[in-house]
Image (cartoon, rainbow, N blue to C red):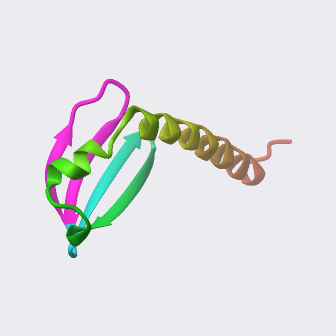
Amino acid sequence: MRIIKEIPHERYKIQLLQYNAKFIVKIELGQFEQTFKIGELDVQTVDDVERMITPTLLSNCLNRFIEMRADWEMAFSSVNIKD
């Protein structure tokens, strides 16, 4: 897996990677991450992939991160019940 580019953002760590004939967009927030894969043949350039990272996509990612955290907290609390 090769890092092509890191995209600066005030909230997220965003990386564009290339692996196995795919571009991978990795968006991290704290201990959670989301990845999106797109075939190299489905886009013309890396710039096309970068243009897909819109404010709407990032807003939706934030909602999923919130859901992920809630799911993790519920799973964590189910095995760490203190009497």
Q: Nearer the viewer, residue 34 or 77?
A: 34
| Residue 44 in view here | yes
**Rendered location of residue 36, percent (x, y):** 38, 58
Q: Nearer the viewer, residue 41 or 25?
A: 41
Q: Is residue 13 magenta?
A: yes
**Rendered location of residue 3, percent (x, y):** 16, 55
Query: Which residue lies at the image location 43% right of the left edge and 37% below the top edge?
Result: 58
Q: Nearer the viewer, residue 74 or 77?
A: 74
- Dominant secondary structure of the magenta stretch? strand
Q: Nearer the viewer, residue 31 or 26?
A: 26
Query: Which residue lies at the image location 52% right of the left edge and 40% below the top edge?
Result: 60
> Does residue 24 sit above or below 54 in this rendering?
below
> Does residue 7 sit above or below 47 in this rendering?
above
Q: Is residue 4 magenta?
A: yes
**Rendered location of residue 79, percent (x, y):** 73, 54
Q: Residue furthest right?
A: 83
- What's drawn in magenta, residue-wise? 1-18
Query: Which residue lies at the image location 24% right of the left edge and 52% below the top edge?
Result: 49
Q: Is 32 positioned to the left or the right of 9 in the image?
A: right
